[in-house]
Image (spheres, rainbow, N blue to C red):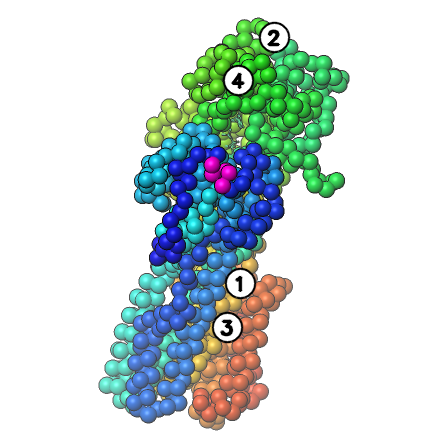
């Protein structure tokens, strides 16, 4: 976010000094109904969408000017100037055209890359939970209007300025607005009008983040009228196209430029002093040499490859938030994944209810509240089972979710809220409990919200006679210790219950324990301190959440690709192990959060490689696991969704957040956001990351030897004292036309078939390996030789110098063209059926280039500028024959590499 001049100077009403009722009255809304759809539509019209103005993009002309800010362009401009002074207008024209064309290519490519990234970012919108027409619904945060009743959850970004109506241990981090880094405790009582923003306890401001607790508030200001809008904060920033790799390549290109200029200078001196060549011709030849040799297009091609990769990933549900992540993804060695919803479907179903004296099976699937209860194989009448009734009552009352029938007849039932709680509602309804009746009979008075740290939730209710009762539900370890007896009145036999829990967990069930306790009449508040051993255990429920089919496949793919997959879950160790087995995860040893707490870092480091399943783990454990794995030299992708996961996501090499169930805090800390929350998407993104890297290497492998070939032709002729086989203007031509066509084609190369059968690329591996360098030299030598051969052969046939040069230029271009088809695979053979079909862009570019070259050879205006002449069929046969030979020779070298079992694309 950036800050600009404030636009709206009118004072805001003192919402913080008014009572909640007064604010609700002002906006004509009831706290338990929310606005109606019509009012929302009217206000949306009147106040506009709840969106801050976007940061202005960089000005087009500045971007265009910046294209000229490049050492190579300076050299070219200087050369153009000198040529002009020497009154060589044709060559000066060619040089200036090259400069302009270069700048335009850079400008267009950069613009496309920025737009691609912008479009991908726009896919990430913030959501808000509101009450409208009496029902809770999730909407895009930019559809909020004043008067909307909004819920706040931990990790969520406050979507608009709110006057708070209810708070539960609500603390908000307001650093973006006030600079105060400690979260501020919120309340609902009005504060004096004179209080500054930082002290307005009863307000929650747009853009700040809920650190802990929950709250409900009424929207009082949106978009530009919010405090954030008033200080001139703007949404979004211009995406940066710089990544460690582009920086490295930039640096490499700079070093090469200096080297090439030196070589050029020496060539010039040699040609002038030793060979006594004419100054102007020599000068232009050296400029041509510099232009041909400097891989000026490389950083731009890399940016385009990264941007295209980002777009492909977005199409496959993986949104890149930081461009460098695209290149890091290809090197990931370990994926640490949450279980619920990422590896599993997050479709919870209660399959058994365990009561003190009997265990009942529950039939039915999904959230549709239709099913029967079975004792053994026999159905029972749930309405006659008191124990089951008590369990269902707790399941309904200690619950924040809502069940909705599907809108169409074939639609399944939906849950608004936590799927675990949704499953409990379905279960309770199957048992005959009617939610609306129960909640009216036992209104909720207070709540201790669920927290992954204490793993339970408790609610306080009053019945019609004023008795107070607390319902508790949570992980069995958290609940059993707080129970003194079970519902049958027996003292709790913890060993017996543990056995039942273990049995259920063995088949992969998530087990929840449900309990209740009477409180002294008149109790209106509960806190963690009240959760003492005073409860009566009502029973247990076992829920299943089957693994996603695609996740099972993806785990397998990852193993073949040399990636370790580790599951980190808040669930019970035995449940986790069972799900791990179903997913085909490697080691069956399970480490629990408690065990991790007892280990020092050194011990953890030695254990972390052998363990694939971590249970009852909290966000702090994730942070330690990332550190331990990184200390082992691993490159870690870590998933997360909660506000407390943010530090682990930041620490990981690739932080992965869930787009659907993730909090805003987690998404903002992440490098990658999965819009479908699916583990298989991570595996696909890694595949694409590898493909991106392959394409960058392909581009290097293509551009460096073709540049080398072009430069070599000039250098050799000067040093050997031969006539230049291509003129400087012609070299600029070759360089420019191949840069617009061929070099770009490789960015569109699809992932190679065996890409996920290779081990991950070492991040420290050099970009240009020894074998790469050998290929580079080999191809450069082939290009230079072929060009000289064609040139000398044409002269020997009695052709003119112009004809020989035209043939030489066409030889260079044809050589580059066939080499493009070699280079698409570093080791794999190019003799395959899909040579022309796999990457249609390559074919298209090839056709385009052939067209351009024909014009160069036969079109009279170009013939005048470049001194070219039409070639006869014999010349073409020679050029094509040599090109084919070049193709075959490179394929031969690849076959040698294959024999030596060199791995690569
Ligand atoms: P994962 O870490 O695999 O994604 P998770 O995030 O669902 O799993 P948590 O939400 O931390 O895990 O839940 C941990 C435990 O807390 C669960 O095993 C369950 O026993 C209990 N639990 C989960 N949801 C609730 C809830 N809404 N109310 C009470 N207890 C719950």
Between disc 2 and disc 1, whose residue precedes? 2
Between disc 3 and disc 1, whose residue precedes? 3
Q: Which span of residues is magenta-colored?
A: 22-26
The tag on residue 488 is 2
Give the number of the mark in front: 4 or 1: 4
- Nearer to the camera, 89 or 475: 475
Between disc 3 and disc 2, whose residue precedes? 2
Left or right of 429 on screen, residue 496:
left
Say above or below: 828 vs 190.
below
Between disc 4 and disc 1, whose residue precedes? 4
At horizontal 31% and vertical 77% (from top left) the residue drawn is 75
Q: How many marks?
A: 4
Give the number of the mark in front: 3 or 2: 2
Crowding around mark 4 (Cα neighbors within 10 Å: few <14, some 14 to 19, many 20+) is many
Which residue is label 3 attached to?
741
Distance from label 4 to label 2 (Cα)? 18 Å
Which residue is label 1 attached to?
748
At horizontal 47% and vertical 48% (from top left) the residue drawn is 222
**How far from the left and from the top, in percent, is residue 175?**
34, 42
């Amino acid at each position: 976010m950036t800050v600009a001049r404030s636009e709206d100077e009118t004072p805001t009403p003192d919402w913080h000094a008014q009572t909640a009722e007064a604010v609700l009255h002002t906006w004509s809304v009831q706290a338990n109904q929310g606005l109606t759809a019509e009012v929302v539509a009217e206000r949306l019209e009147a106040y506009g969408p709840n969106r801050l103005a976007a940061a202005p993009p960089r000005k087009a002309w500045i971007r265009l000017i910046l294209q000229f800010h490049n050492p190579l362009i300076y050299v070219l401009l200087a050369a153009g100037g000198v040529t002009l002074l020497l009154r060589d207008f044709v060559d000066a024209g060619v040089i200036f055209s090259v400069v302009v064309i270069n700048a335009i290519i850079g400008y267009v490519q950069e613009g496309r890359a920025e737009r691609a990234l912008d479009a991908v970012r726009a896919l990430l919108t913030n959501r808000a939970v509101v009450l409208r027409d009496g029902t809770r619904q999730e909407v895009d945060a930019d559809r909020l209007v004043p008067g909307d009743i909004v819920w706040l959850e931990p990790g969520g970004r406050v979507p608009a300025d709110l006057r708070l109506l209810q708070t539960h241990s609500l603390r908000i981090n307001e650093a973006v607005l006030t600079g105060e880094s400690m979260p501020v405790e919120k309340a609902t009582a009005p504060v004096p009008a004179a209080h500054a923003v930082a002290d307005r306890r009863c307000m929650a401001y747009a853009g700040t983040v809920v650190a802990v607790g929950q709250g409900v508030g009424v929207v009082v200001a949106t978009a530009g009228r919010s405090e954030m809008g008033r200080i001139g904060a703007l949404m979004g920033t211009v995406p940066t196209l710089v990544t460690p790799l582009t920086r490295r390549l930039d640096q490499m290109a700079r070093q090469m430029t200096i080297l090439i200029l030196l070589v050029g200078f020496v060539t010039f001196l040699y040609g002038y002093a030793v060979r006594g060549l004419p100054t102007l011709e020599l000068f232009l030849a050296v400029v041509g040499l510099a232009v041909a040799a400097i891989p000026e297009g490389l950083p731009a091609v890399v940016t385009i490859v990264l941007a295209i990769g980002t777009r492909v990933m977005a199409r496959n549900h993986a949104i890149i938030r930081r461009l460098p992540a695209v290149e890091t993804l290809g090197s990931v060695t370990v994926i640490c994944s949450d279980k619920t919803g990422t590896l599993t479907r997050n479709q919870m179903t209660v399959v058994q209810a365990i009561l003190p004296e009997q265990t009942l099976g529950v039939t039915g699937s999904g959230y549709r509240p239709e099913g029967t209860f079975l004792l053994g194989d026999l159905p029972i009448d749930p309405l006659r089972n008191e124990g089951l009734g008590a369990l269902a009552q707790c399941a309904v009352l200690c619950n924040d979710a809502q069940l909705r029938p599907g809108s169409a007849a074939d639609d399944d039932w939906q849950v608004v809220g936590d799927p675990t709680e949704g499953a409990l509602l379905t279960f309770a309804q199957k048992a005959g409990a009617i939610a609306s009746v129960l909640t009216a009979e036992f209104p909720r008075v207070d709540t201790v919200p669920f927290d992954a740290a204490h793993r339970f939730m408790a609610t306080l209710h009053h019945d019609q006679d004023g008795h107070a009762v607390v319902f508790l539900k949570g992980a069995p370890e958290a609940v059993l210790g707080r129970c003194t007896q079970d519902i049958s009145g027996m003292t709790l036999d913890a060993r017996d219950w543990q056995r039942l829990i273990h049995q259920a967990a063995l088949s992969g069930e998530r087990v929840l324990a449900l309990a209740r306790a009477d409180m002294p009449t008149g109790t209106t508040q509960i806190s963690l301190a009240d959760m003492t051993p005073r409860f009566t255990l009502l029973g247990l429920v076992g829920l299943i959440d089957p693994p996603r089919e695609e996740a099972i496949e993806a785990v397998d793919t990852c193993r073949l690709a040399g990636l370790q997959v580790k599951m980190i879950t808040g669930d019970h160790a035995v449940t986790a192990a069972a799900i791990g087995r179903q997913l085909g995860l490697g080691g069956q040893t399970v480490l629990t959060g408690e065990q991790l707490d007892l280990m020092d870092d050194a011990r953890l480091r030695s254990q972390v490689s052998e363990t694939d399943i971590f249970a009852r783990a909290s966000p702090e454990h994730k942070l330690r696991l990332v550190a331990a794995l990184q200390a082992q030299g691993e490159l870690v992708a870590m998933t997360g969704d909660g506000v407390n996961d943010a530090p682990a996501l930041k620490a990981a090499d690739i932080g992965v957040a869930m787009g659907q169930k993730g909090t805003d805090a987690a998404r903002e800390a992440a490098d990658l956001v999965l819009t479908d929350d699916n583990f298989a998407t991570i595996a696909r993104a890694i595949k694409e990351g590898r493909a991106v890297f392959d394409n960058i290497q392909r581009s290097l492998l293509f551009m460096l030897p073709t540049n080398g070939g072009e430069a070599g032709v000039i250098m050799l002729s000067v040093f050997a004292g031969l006539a230049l086989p291509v003129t400087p203007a012609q070299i600029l031509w070759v360089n420019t036309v191949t840069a617009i066509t061929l070099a770009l084609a490789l960015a569109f190369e699809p992932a190679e078939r065996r890409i996920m059968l290779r081990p991950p690329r070492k991040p420290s591996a050099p970009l240009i390996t020894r074998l790469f360098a050998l290929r580079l030299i080999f191809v450069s030598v082939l290009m230079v030789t072929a060009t000289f051969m064609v040139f000398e052969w044409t002269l020997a046939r009695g052709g003119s110098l112009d004809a020989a040069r035209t043939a030489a230029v066409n030889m260079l271009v044809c050589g580059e063209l066939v080499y493009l088809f070699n280079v698409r695979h570093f080791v794999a053979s190019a003799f395959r059926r899909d040579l022309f079909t796999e990457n249609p862009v390559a074919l298209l570019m090839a056709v385009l280039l052939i067209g351009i070259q024909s014009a160069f050879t036969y079109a009279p205006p170009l013939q005048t500028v470049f001194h070219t002449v039409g070639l006869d069929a014999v010349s073409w046969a020679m050029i094509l024959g040599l090109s084919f030979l070049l193709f075959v020779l490179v394929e031969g070298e690849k076959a040698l590499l294959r024999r030596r079992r060199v791995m690569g694309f």
